[in-house]
Image (spheres, grey):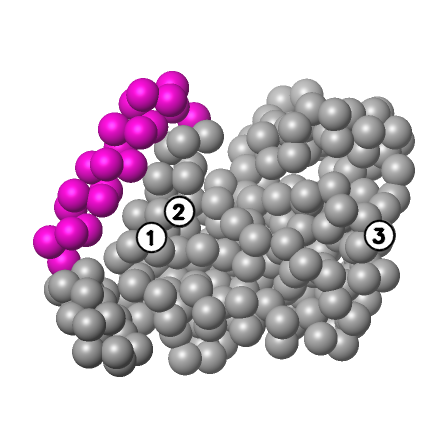
Amino acid sequence: MSDVHMERDGHVAVLSLDNPPLNIMTAQMRAPFLAALDEVRRDSQVRAVVLTGRGDRAFCAGADLNEEADLTPETVRAFLDEDCAIYDGVAELPVPVVAAINGHCMGGGLELALSCDLRVVAEDAKLCGAGVKVGLVVSTTRMTRLVGPAVAKDLLLTGRTFLGDEAVRLGLATSSTPRSQVLSSAVKLGQLIARRAPLAVRRTKQAIDEAAELPFAEAMSRELDHFAELSETNDHKHAIAAFFDRQPPSFTGE
C-alpha cells in the first residue's frame, strides 16, 4: 500500500515516499503527503526537512499514468491544482527542504525535486522533464527560475534524460554522491542547516524567495527589515557573546 512516512533525526524531519517500485505520486498519496507537511509546520523543533523516496530505484518517477489517462477537459485543471498543492506545499514550508534524489526523478518527480530548496542527487540517477515526449508542457516555471532559460530550453525542449552528475554541472543539484550515500549526505546537509540560528534560517529562505520575486529596491528593503528584526533576538545576542567567549553558539530559536 502506498504511503508517506515521516521520521525525526534530531531537528531534521525525513519524509519518504513509499510506493514501490518507482514511488509514483498517486491520488491516494496526496492526503498523507499534505498531512506530513502540516505536521512539519506545527513542529517547532523541526529546523530542516529531507525528502526522499524509499528503496534504491527512485526518488519519484512522476504521477500515475492510469489516473492521467482518465482525465477529461472538465477534470484536468482540478487534477493539476491538486498536484500543485503538493509542490507549493513543499516550496512554501518555512524551513529548508533538501531533496535526496536516490534514483529515477521524472515528470512530477522532477517538479517535486525542483520545489525543494536544495538537491543531493545520486551520480547515476536519471532525471527527465518529458513533457514534449508526451505532448505536454512541464516544469518550465520552476526550472527557468532555478537555472535560467538556456538550461531550461536545453532540457525541456528536448525532453532528454540526464544523469545526476550533469544535474550538478547545470546547477539543478547541489551535489552528487554514490547512490548508497544520497540519504546520509542529504541528512548531514539538513543537520548542518539545523545547527544554524533557526529564526535566521527561516528568514534567509524567505528573503531569498522575496529577492527572486520583487524589484531590487523592494527586495533589499525586505532584507534590511529581516536583519533589523533579527538583531533583537536572543539567538543573535547569544551568538555575539559566544564569539567573544570563543565558544560555539547553541541556538534556541528565540
Q: Is residue 171 left or right of residue 166?
A: left
- Whether residue 194 is situated above or below residue 38 in the rendered picture: below
Please tell me the numbered disc located at residue 202: 1
For image coordinates 74% across by 42% down, the residue present is 170
The picture places residue 80, in percent across and down from the top left corner, at 60, 33
The picture places residue 223, in percent across and down from the top left corner, at 29, 37
Q: Which residue is mark 3?
A: 163
For image coordinates 73% across by 50% down, the residue present is 168
* Quadrant of residue 242 within the rendered picture: bottom left
Q: Is residue 166 left or right of residue 81?
A: right
For image coordinates 29% across by 55% down, the residue present is 200
The three-letter code of the residue at mark 1 reads Arg
Q: Are marks 1 and 2 in contact (CB under 8 Å)?
A: yes
Q: Is residue 110 left or right of residue 214?
A: right
Q: Secondary structure at mark 2?
A: helix
Q: Secondary structure at mark 1?
A: helix
